[in-house]
Image: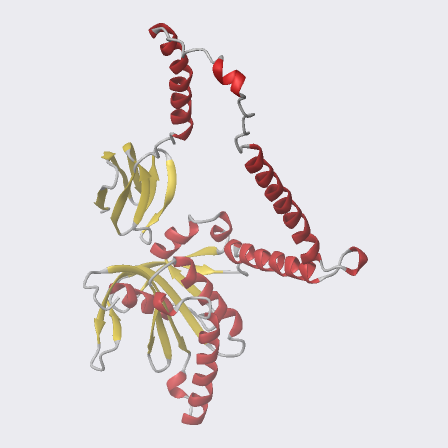
């Protein structure tokens, strides 16, 4: 992250405590401690490497480097857990740049964080507003997410710049977290079942291990049996009488010799054909650089939104790439990907 010198498109959550500066110092300290606890709890599920937190005194600005959904869930978590704490929130998706401040710590600058602060300034205590850019990206990820937003119209900031804003209403029908919770419940039920006892008081783990041990023993017995069966049998001894009457070796005709070796040759071909494995199809990669964002389709199949999507593995061969943004005509490219090759797709919507 520190080595990055390019502009990134990130989700930024800006939030503050309403009328914080008008409070006595003792009240400010109490409000800020409660605010920090609520924010920290809402960010527990976001890895530290995927976020940068800036303390603004009366609030904070959080930049999310990964999934835009993380910003939505964290903002809704703060809004729902703030209770009597007068917090207002704004989320924006836009360009930011990573820089180091005077203390050598990572800082965020750019229009993305400035617009997030403007969006927050339009909200009332307990209200969560998002910009149009953030709404357009998140709402297309799931039908459930589309139902969360309500258009609030246009707002003008102090710099006479217009912003389309959307409020986030209701609870979060979090499909992703619901699936994670279901997986955790299923795993817990499996562990509980394994820890119990079955018939005759035997542990279920032992009952599961018994069939495996049985088949392993049967397989070992067959292996030993086949080893003894393949041992060459000894020939009976030749008596002196038989030794005197042994005929001379017969001369084998050339045609007969070829007939004897033919089955061996056919057997080698059969073994070679069985051992030969089908070759795996070569694969390549697509490297995406889409500004400000776009839905990516490969051969008619949607693969995601870029950014944050940066690379995609594809089979070698010809492909049709379509990048769509509602504000501009779609971008279409015909490409040929070779095995182990990386093809760059760069486009800027105007």
Residue 326 seen in the figure: no
Q: Is residue 317 left or right of residue 277?
A: left
Which residue does the image show at 39% across and 23% down from the upper left?
268
Which residue does the image show at 64% across and 57% down from the upper left?
190
Residue 254 seen in the figure: yes
Q: How many marks?
A: 0
Q: How is the image coloured?
A: secondary structure
Give x and y (percent) for residue 51: 35, 68
Give x and y (percent) for residue 100: 21, 74
Give x and y (percent) for residue 97: 23, 65
Q: Nearer the viewer, residue 277 or 250?
A: 250
The relative height of residue 147 versus residue 248 in the rendered view (above or below) is below
Q: Is residue 205 left or right of residue 269?
A: right
Q: Is residue 179 left or right of residue 197?
A: left
Position of the N terminus, as image quadrant, is bottom left
Which residue does the image show at 57% across and 36% down from the upper left?
228
**Given the current orientation, which residue lies at the most extreme right position?**
200
Q: Nearer the viewer, residue 90 or 319?
A: 319
Give x and y (percent) for residue 233: 55, 29
């Amino acid at each position: 992250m520190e080595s990055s010198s390019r502009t990134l498109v990130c989700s930024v959550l800006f939030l503050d405590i309403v009328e914080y500066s008008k409070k006595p110092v003792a009240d400010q300290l109490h409000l800020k401690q409660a605010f920090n606890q609520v924010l920290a709890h809402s960010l527990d599920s976001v890895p530290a490497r995927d976020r940068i937190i800036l303390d603004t005194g009366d609030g904070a600005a959080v930049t999310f480097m990964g999934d835009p959904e993380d910003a939505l869930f964290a903002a809704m978590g703060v809004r729902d857990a703030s209770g009597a704490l007068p917090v207002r929130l704004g989320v924006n998706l836009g360009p930011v740049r990573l820089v180091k401040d005077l203390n050598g710590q990572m800082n965020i600058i750019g229009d993305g964080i400035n617009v997030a602060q403007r969006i927050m300034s339009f909200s009332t205590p307990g209200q969560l507003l998002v910009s149009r850019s953030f709404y357009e990206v998140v709402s297309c990820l799931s039908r459930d997410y589309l139902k969360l937003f309500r258009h609030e119209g246009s707002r003008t900031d102090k710099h006479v710049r217009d912003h389309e804003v959307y409020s986030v209403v209701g609870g979060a029908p979090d499909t992703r977290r619901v699936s994670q919770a279901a997986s955790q419940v299923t795993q817990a039920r499996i562990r509980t079942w394994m820890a119990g006892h079955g018939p005759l008081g035997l542990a279920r783990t032992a009952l599961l291990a018994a069939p495996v041990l049985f088949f392993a023993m049967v397989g070992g017995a067959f292996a030993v049996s086949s080893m003894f069966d393949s041992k060459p049998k000894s020939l009976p001894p030749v008596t002196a009488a038989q030794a005197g009457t042994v005929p001379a070796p017969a001369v084998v005709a050339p045609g007969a010799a070829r007939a004897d070796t033919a089955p061996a040759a056919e057997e080698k071909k059969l073994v070679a054909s069985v051992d030969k494995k089908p070759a795996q199809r070569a694969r390549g990669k697509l490297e995406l650089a889409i500004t400000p964002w776009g839905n990516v389709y490969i051969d008619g199949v949607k693969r995601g939104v870029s950014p944050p999507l940066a690379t995609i593995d594809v089979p070698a061969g010809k492909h049709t790439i379509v990048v769509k943004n509602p504000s501009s005509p779609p971008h279409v490219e015909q490409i040929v990907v070779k095995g182990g090759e990386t093809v760059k797709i760069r486009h800027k919507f105007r």
